[in-house]
Image: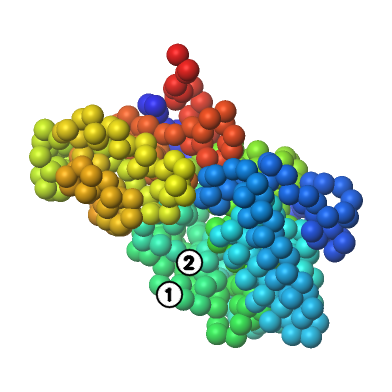
Amino acid sequence: MVTGVPGAFAGPGPADVPRMATVRPVARSDRRAPHWLAGDQEAPIDHGDAVASDQLGLHLSLGPASVARTTTYRARVDGLLDRAMALVGQDDEEAVRWARVAADVAWHHHTGRFVTPFLEELLIDVGRSAVPSVDLPSVGGGIVHVLTEGYATGGHTRLVARWIDAQGSVAHVVHTSPGAGRIPELLADSVARSGGSSIGADGGGGLLHTAGRLRSLVVDAEAVVLHTHPWDVVPSLAFAHDGGPPVVMVAHTDNVHLVGHEIADRLVTLRRAATEVATTRRGIPPERIVEVPIPVPDPERELSQAQARAELGLDDDLEMILTVGPYYKYIGDGVIDFVDLVEPILRDRPRAVLVAVGPPLHGRFEELHQMTGGRVIACGPRLDLATFFAAADVYVESHAITGITATLEAASHGLPVVTFTPPDRLVPVLDSDSPGLDGLSRHPTPE
């Protein structure tokens, strides 16, 4: 149970991210071996990899089927990378498109790897040889935050906006996705308050051209902070060369395969579990890692609980259980999921109602809605989270994937928070932890 939140956020400033010596790419002969193993032999899929694949890839059943599934995913990614490599030097644009497909598959279907050295090397090689020079004015000085795209809901974009608000200097935002369009209002407001600007790096000329545009846009930056998606290969292409501003990558998706860390001078992790994965499974030296808390401002409570419930159409005497997160974070693949955890509570407490912000009334949520006579309200994404926090009695974190930003926000509103810890902490990244929370949470014991 969480009873407090970290103090003021202190993100790494320009002085904390000095330019490092170039990281030497892993030899091509090692492309199928996890980079934490020595030698060029084919790496076997072991039980630990199956656990990573299944639990982090939302497949929670373990055993021979898990190993087989992991082997299939790994072979699929390797095949895509072989196809990409065959095109290098002949059609580099097509090569990096296939590399992006490989990264996307590795993100959605965990291979037991958290990084693929051969993919990193391929992108750096092509970035050094094939990214064109683009005559484009830079955004100027200050910190440049690079996103694949931003969202009006969810913790990813809120983190960027709050970082900009906390840093107290000019900040710019560049997005790499051709479909990103205008950045969300909350992020645009933070950029405007800083005196910065926002711009799209995509110019309609393909991935290599986008990488060239990104490189030109940030050439005068004090530092570049990457908040990009796990499959976004553009930063790896843009920052493959020596020189340029310091590059910081934020590991905001710490439970999945990541692309791009080889071109980053520092990796920012947002919790201890992410740091553990970075050092033990991504092979990143501890001196390149900066662990910082997720920024959560003090809430401005404008509504009483009664007022908030009236606004949401809920009775005063209900016991309101709140959870916030996108639908995919609640899926447990039939072994144990969020619905399994809360169903006994709703069964035993007839005045309890579950309000889920983010998921639609679909699948398991619809099943529980029918089972409880309508005491499950799944209302999809909402922007007015403060109203829901004010109305709730208790907050229950999403499972099987944690939602740490929403959990910290719930705690900052004074709500008791319940999270799920896997037995024996089999996969630590499934836990909910954050710098500053040590000693503030209580774990159940067998007694």
Position in image of residue 443 (x %, y %):
46, 23
- Give the crowd class for mark 1: few <14, some 14-19, many >=20 residues within 10 Å: few
The reply to whether callout 1 and callout 2 are in contact (CB within 8 Å) is: yes
Residue 55 screen position, x and y as percent:
56, 45
- Residue 240 can be seen in this image: no
Q: Nearer the viewer, residue 267 or 82?
A: 82
Q: Residue 78, percent across and down?
A: 73, 65
Q: Which residue is painted at 74% across and 54% down in the image?
A: 19
Give the camera-side residue of 96 and 427.
427
| Looking at the image, residue 202 lies above or below residue 11 | below
Q: Work out whether 122 lies above or below 284.
A: below
Quadrant of the frame with the N terminus? top left
The correct choice, above or below, for 290 with respect to 264 in the image is above
> Circle 2 is placed at which residue position?
149
Q: Residue at x 21, y 49 (%)?
A: 370
Q: What residue did someone put label 1 on?
A: 181
Number of numbered callouts drawn: 2
Q: Amino acid at mark 2?
A: Glu
